Image (cartoon, grey):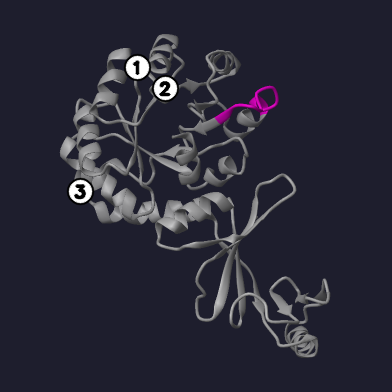
Amino acid sequence: MIDQLALAGLVPVIKVERAEDAVPLCRALAQGGLPVAEITFRTEAAEEAIRRVHAEMPDILLGAGTVLSIDQADRAIAAGAGYIVTPGFNPKVVAHCLEKGYPVLPGCAGPSDIEAALEMGLKAVKFFPAEALGGVKTLKALLGPYHMMRFVPTGGINEGNLKDYLNIRQVLACGGSWMVPDEAIKAGDWARIEQLTRGAVQQVLGLELRHVGLNHPDAKAGMATAELLSQLTGWPILRDSERGCFVGDGFEVMKLQGRGTYGHIALAANDLSRAKWHLQRRGFEFDESSLELDASGRPRLIYIKDEIAGFGIHLSQK
């Protein structure tokens, strides 16, 4: 569960007043790129909403939020929730979930909560209410003594601060509700929710064009192209080697037949593993043999399996 949340990067936090809205709402989220939902026990419809989503969309990573009691935790799991989220650290509820084998993300607001979670063997917690507690600044301060803990910040997360949280290595994912506004749910405006979700996923991925690589049959042809591009753009020729060189940061001029019929396109992502997961959900396959790791063993670069318009496409870690 924790690994799946980390790959999704963003968890829509949902309040459902009518159980019949839950399935079309979760379908809109999935079509927008987020097959994830945390349905909160803030309404009487929550339990039935979870039951319906689990029955009709079993592939959704489905959590039950705002769980305040042992009874609610049992009902949520019986209805089909895959994990439990609590707003605060209730030792009785957390202990019950661990005893029963329910994955649980308890809310933690400070050092005492985090230490209680560590004492129980938890490796991830919810940081709530994130912005009210001081946001990124507070979370980074907590990571000094508690760098081993992983967090899901929730509360006040929006388009403006999402990237700041996700840039913290110990942040698994963020919880947010801006892609599921109450008025859209009440109006059954699933198209709007899908559009908002799609935009949120784009923020999570942060895909940027880094450079275009151009293949050549030999070094002479490659250098001729590099000199022309440098003359055109005014950008200097950099990092010259037997294999190729760069013209500024925008072109990688190969002095040989590199990857792709004509060359390659480099896209950078906020988190390579997360971007790969999302793009696989869009139907793209990856060439695992092309995977490169950085010095710490984290993914640094990987190619999409098929060319697009004669160009190989690789993702790289920002």
Spatial separation of the CA atoms under disc 3 and disc 1: 29 Å
Task: For the residues labelled 1 and 2, say whether their Cβ atoms are less than 8 Å apart.
Answer: yes
Spatial separation of the CA atoms under disc 3 and disc 2: 28 Å
Q: Is residue 302 left or right of residue 157?
A: right
Residue that carries the numbered disc 3 in the rendered image:
188
Residue at the location (36% across, 46% down)? 35
Q: Earlier in the sequence, mark 1 or mark 2?
A: 1
Spatial separation of the CA atoms under disc 1 and disc 2: 8 Å
Residue at the location (35% across, 24% down)? 66
- How would you rate the neighbour count of disc 1 (Cα within 10 Å): few for under 14, some for 14-19, many for 20 or more? some
As rendered, which of 135 and 12 lies closer to the eye? 12
Task: For the residues labelled 3 and 2, say whether their Cβ atoms are less than 8 Å apart.
Answer: no
- How would you rate the neighbour count of disc 2 (Cα within 10 Å): few for under 14, some for 14-19, many for 20 or more? some
In terms of image quadrants, where is residue 61? Answer: top left
Residue that carries the numbered disc 1 in the rendered image:
68
Q: Quadrant of the C terminus?
A: bottom right
Q: Is residue 143 magenta?
A: yes
Q: What amino acid is at disc 1?
A: Leu
Residue 223, x across and y down, in percent:
79, 86
Residue at the location (75% across, 82% down)? 255
Q: Quadrant of the N terminus?
A: top left
- How would you rate the neighbour count of disc 3 (Cα within 10 Å): few for under 14, some for 14-19, many for 20 or more? some
Residue that carries the numbered disc 2 in the rendered image:
87
Residue 94, x across and y down, in percent:
43, 15
As rendered, which of 93 and 161 lies closer to the eye? 93
